Amino acid sequence: IAVLIALLLPAVQAAREAARRAQCVNNMKQIGLGLMNYENANSAFPPPKIWSGSGIGNNGGINGVLNTTGFTMILGYLEQTQLVNAYNFMQASSNSVNGPNNRVIGDAAVNSTVVGTLVAAYACPSDQPPDVQNSTDSVYHRNNARRSNYFFCSTLWMEYYGPYAWGGSLPGYVDSSRGMFITDTSTRLAEVTDGLSNTAMVGESPQIHLSSTWGPYWGSGVHTSTNGNVYPPPPLVNQIVANIGLGPEWRDYTTTLPNAPPNAIQCGGPCGNLKLPYANVMGSKHPGGLNMAFGDGSVRFIKNSISGQTWWAVNTIKGGEIVSSDSY
């Protein structure tokens, strides 16, 4: 009997994972459909996050707060109308912990019930059940915020040190790629010149990275699932650097651009073994890769072995690259 169990157990586990992965694909199709329905109603996609709510900065001035996420804005298209109706878009959903000089205006707890709700479409069943978090990390803390498993694909922003090939040898940064989603910006279909079938919109990410207090969170302010720096693992870093001619010492800033493999070590600048707790990496609990939703409504499995050049191409909207579907 023991031998029979040993023979059958891997097959049972594989079947269960296949079912979980299929549910994850269904989740991403719902999100993709929600985004397309939002675009149809508003002639543009939602921003990944927008300034919503006000705060008082250290200098005493009034500042906007990165409060509302695109995941909140499409709730009504995911049959979650009661949640979006209960959400106060004029109030920050995270309180400041660096008070009293740095604080939000009003009661951020008014949105805690909404952002603490488990939305099945935002949780991959292959990961642990999404928990809620109340943290005092960095400038803002989360009020009963629920974790998520999905990211919007955003702009790749590289801050580097050393010469680069594109614009001469000036130090600084280069906004080298344009993803589907940019903070406080709504992308229109006409801007996606690579074609919707060639452009990724949403990818997966494990709920917990190097620090249990950071995202992704689907609806909570500065610590949203569209916030945090994304650092490619060293092999992918080397490929990207080789392709675009950046110097050896650099770091990559973005809200949501995904990178594989899952749970990769994040590196800072200069590149090394620096692990950043707020760095969110794309990946999943599925063996071998992660699911990604594309602009045409399809959901495809991206292998961990994807090349840096191909990874770059599928996450940008107007690079003009030619990418074969068998390359990922």
Image (cartoon, helix red, strand yellow):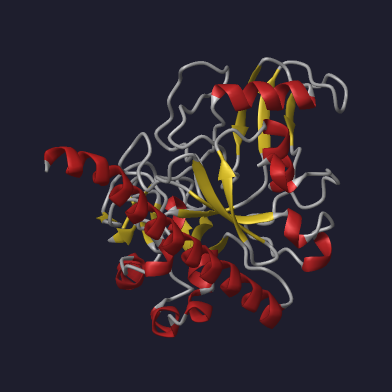
Looking at the rendered image, the quarter that the N terminus falls into is: top left
Q: Is residue 289 visible?
A: yes
Q: Is residue 124 visible?
A: no
Q: Is residue 310 left or right of residue 165?
A: left
In the picture shown, does residue 145 fall above or below 119? Answer: above
What residue sits 70% from the left and 44% below the top?
326
Residue 221 locus on image (x, y percent): 44, 58
What residue sits 84% from the left and 22% below the top?
165
Say which quarter of the image contains residue 162: top right
Q: Between residue 148 and residue 9, name the one nearer to us.
A: 9
Q: Between residue 142 and residue 205, name the one nearer to us.
A: 205
Q: Is residue 34 left or right of residue 128?
A: right
Q: Is residue 252 left or right of residue 148?
A: right
What residue sits 51% from the left and 24% below the top?
267
In the picture shown, does residue 83 fall above or below 29? Answer: below
Q: How many marks?
A: 0
Residue 215 locus on image (x, y percent): 40, 48
Looking at the rendered image, the quarter that the C terminus falls into is: top right
Residue 33 locus on image (x, y percent): 59, 73
Q: Is residue 103 left or right of residue 150?
A: left
Residue 150 locus on image (x, y percent): 48, 55
In the picture shown, does residue 161 fall above or below 318? Answer: above
